[in-house]
Image (cartoon, rainbow, N blue to C red):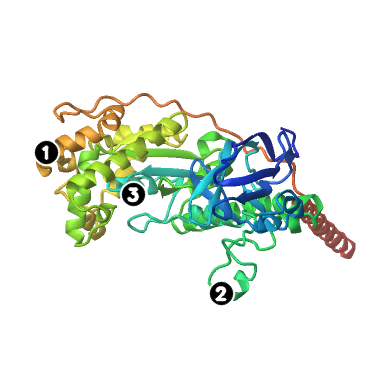
Amino acid sequence: MSENGRVEILEIHRAEVDTEALWGFAIDQPKQRSKTNTYTIYVAGWILGKQSKVIEVELLDSGRPLRKAIVGRSRPDVAKQYPQVSEAANSGFQIEVGVIGLPLEGELSIQAIFENQSSVAVGVIKYRRQRLHSNYKSRVQPLLMTSSGRSGSTWIMRLLSHHPKIVTSQIHPYEIRVSQYWMQMLAILSQPHNPVDFPPDYFYNEFRCTGQNPYHNYNISHCLDSSWLGREYIENLADFCRQNIDNFYEDIATQQGKALTQTSDSSSNCYFVEKFLLKLNRTVLLELYPQAREIILVRDFRDMACSITAFNTKRGYVDFGRQRFKSDREYIQKGVRSAAHNILQLWKQRKEQAHLVRYEDLILAPQETLSSIFEYLNLDNSSSTISKILEKASEDTPQLKRHRTSANPQESIGRWRHDLEPSLQDLCTEVCKEALQEFGYSLSGEEKPSPLPKTIKPQIETEASLTPTRSNVMNQTESARKYLKQIKSQLQNIKNSLEQC
């Protein structure tokens, strides 16, 4: 794809017309093999229901709804073709979707929604796009700590927070998610405006929310040079978000007495670490930060289920998804199984870039486990540094006491063999069997976990920028002009001082 082609339409597959449900339809835009210089895909056409009126057209990504558009735009050409159908004159639709957060190569499904709430497939758009690069160079890189609940995430975050080159808020339970806030803001504000989601006057009638940019839409984009809203606006927004993430964590680092100064030496990497869930904002973050690292933390899912039950009992209310199920059996069949499946799928997708850590290894062999983590991150993993980290992290606090559900961490390992009744033990082992085996856990619980595969240290990627945007070039030029003016002023002062001598 050329430098100016942010999105390329590879193929458009038009579905067969369901003659019982539709008079007909057309996908006029986009055109196959067309390219755009914006981070958006524009879809337009017409559709005409037969037995029930088509009221909306929807775009989906892997079954996930993205955007809806109301069918009602003027189409006199369709009215001429179907003079007997009253809705034909207003059967047009147009819809624009931003690609930030979508796969770099994927497909969008188009479906029509009828007045009776039934739906029918219309077509599929296959596309390829460039990764969103901002011109801002981040000084602190993300470290994603991804796990299911009650898998030891609070303990590993406490350990990581004491490394001199890793920063996070040291407020228990270490769940500050600043970067995820900014990534969500970027994902929302980079989307073209959609009146189905937000009316055009939303932002000045609602003082608590802004919604999407009401002026980022297809009609207005045509009035702007080089489709500024669909490209430069989004890249500038990415700059702004990354700069605020840097500033936030550098301020915390200063308060903690840490110097997060990154140099060309890879051993001087600096990270901020946050707990992550399996949600879309991680996708945007990984796209914007090619040097990001990820720790995937797992725990025997049978112990995890016991810990969740015990923690809910200790606090006096039900959480961690348990509240959605009527019984322990249903919770294991659906909730625990889903947690095991999701973390397994993530590991399969990310195993070439991420680092796998087992809770059991972290508790029973902390020195070796931390050394492996810091080696993966290209950080100091000397025994003296790790000893200091363990010493600081092991200081008992009221928060840690409230967080525990067993007398000590060692006793929490293998607790499922006495906390779960035999029938639930068998059920949990069965529904989590694939994940348990993948992560090296014994199905019987009699053997020790098998060794984890050796992680290959990822190569450090560079953050190659796209062609600088006009606004960034202007900003850089203005900064250089001011700097030269300051130098000129200083030279003049020196000259004046010499003449007075």
Q: Is residue 95 left or right of residue 495?
A: left
- Can residue 382 be seen at all in this image of the molecule? no
Q: Nearer the viewer, residue 13 or 302?
A: 13
Between the C-alphas of marks 2 and 1, the distance is 54 Å
Say few, some or many: other residues with alpha carbon within 10 Å of mark 1 (under 14 / 14 to 19 / 20 or more).
Answer: few
Q: Nearer the viewer, mark 2 or mark 1?
A: 1
Which disc is residue 158 wearing?
A: 3
Image quarter hosting the N terminus: top right
Disc tally is 3
Q: Label 3 amino acid?
A: Arg
Left or right, residue 214 beside residue 491: left
Q: Residue at x 34, y 39 (%)?
A: 297
Categorize mark 3 by other alpha carbons within 10 Å: few (<14), some (14-19), many (20+): many
Most extreme residue toward the front, as rendered?
84
Q: Nearer the viewer, residue 380 or 240?
A: 240
What element does badge 3 sit on?
Answer: helix
**Image x and y of residue 166, in percent:** 44, 46
Visible in this render: residue 494?
A: yes
**In front: label 3 or label 2:** 2
Task: Assess whether mark 2 and mark 3 are in contact (beta carbons under 8 angstroms).
Answer: no
Q: Which residue is mark 2?
A: 207
Q: What separation in Å lies between label 3 and label 1 (alpha carbons)?
A: 36 Å
Q: Position of residue 289 (x, y in %)?
A: 56, 42
Q: Which residue is mark 1?
A: 423
- Earlier residue among tags 3 and 2: 3
Dot 2: element = loop
> What's under tag 1, amino acid-wise?
Ser
Q: Nearer the viewer, mark 3 or mark 1?
A: 1
